[in-house]
Image (spheres, grey):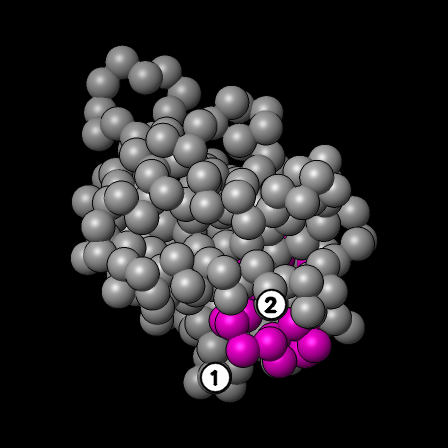
Amino acid sequence: MGNWKMHGGLEANAKLLADLRAGAGILADYCTLAVCAPFPYLAQVSSLLDGSAVSWGAQDVSAHEKGAYTGEVSASMLNDFACAWVLVGHSERRAMHAETDELVADKAKAALAAGLTPVVCVGETLQEQDAGQTLEVIQRQLDPVLALGAEAVSRLVVAYEPVWAIGTGRSATPAQAQDVHAAIRARLAAVNAAQVRVLYGGSVKADNAASLFAMPDIDGALVGGASLVADEFLRIAAA
Ligand code: PEP
């Protein structure tokens, strides 16, 4: 799953989407491919990817259904553009928009209620990792989401994204990521949702993807920078 973040423009998107559409065909037999685009481009993405092997989504959603929430975008609005996915709780939103664990769970709930699949992002900062708090932080972030109940949890995706690995070129090692993914899997299993897909995110590139995907509890990747280059993104999918 690609996260374009705040990148793109009509012209550049058209080329990227055409390249993805052309390259995705056979890969889609083996994996799910998706891109999460900025809100203004969802109409373009839905029209250029319609009928292709690549699905699409947004990078955030309001916890509210409708009303006086200037600047927010509701889950039903995302449905108007046939979004399948929506990221919730990306670390950039937690850090820069003060999103709490509870708000992230409310967003996941709103997305599920509208039939979208939320991709719940969790991950520790470098400081928290250095302090040995990784699993504690992940558990704290996941708890309000797990409290939504087994049925809801079974319909979402979790992305483990250590903050220190995002956009830094410094990916977690496969073993480091696997340890955290196994802990997340155990938490999911405790609410009867062990089959939920757990993606790894943080400087995933074509040359480190295969070693990450070889880990038993890493089901895929949430890819930032490398998702802006069609060939690199398709090579990650091929891995
Ligand atoms: C992300 O934005 O979710 C991400 C993982 O970014 P990058 O792949 O660039 O580290």
Where residue 201 sits, quadrant-wise, is: bottom right
Is residue 63 visible to the viewer in this orientation of the structure? yes
Report the front residue among 146 and 115: 146
Classify mark 2: residues with Cα within 10 Å, few (<14), some (14-19) or many (20+).
many
Report the front residue among 26 and 139: 139
Which residues fall within the magenta stretch? 209-226
Where residue 80 sits, quadrant-wise, is: top left
Task: Write down the residue under mark 2.
Answer: 178
Which three-letter amino acid code belongs to the residue tagged 2? Gln
Q: Are marks 1 and 2 in contact (CB under 8 Å)?
A: no
Is residue 86 visible to the viewer in this orientation of the structure? no
In the displayed structure, 171 sits above or below 37; it is below
The spot of residue 17 in percent (x, y) is 56, 61
CA separation in Å, label 1 and label 2: 21 Å
Give the mark nearest the N terminus, 1 or 2: 1
| In this rendering, position of residue 74 left or right of residue 47 | left
Picture residue at 52% right of the left edge, 81% below the top: 27
- Foreground label between 1 and 2: 2
The spot of residue 180 in percent (x, y) is 57, 59
Picture residue at 72% right of the left edge, 50% below the top: 165
Task: Write down the residue under mark 1.
Answer: 30
- Is residue 23 within the magenta segment? no
Picture residue at 60% right of the left edge, 64% below the top: 179
The spot of residue 238 in percent (x, y) is 61, 80
Picture residue at 46% right of the left edge, 58% below the top: 184
Q: Quadrant of the C terminus?
A: bottom right
Which three-letter amino acid code belongs to the residue tagged 1? Tyr
Element marked by disc 2? helix
- Is residue 218 within the magenta segment? yes
Element marked by disc 1? loop
Report the front residue among 188 and 25: 188
Where residue 69 sits, quadrant-wise, is: top left
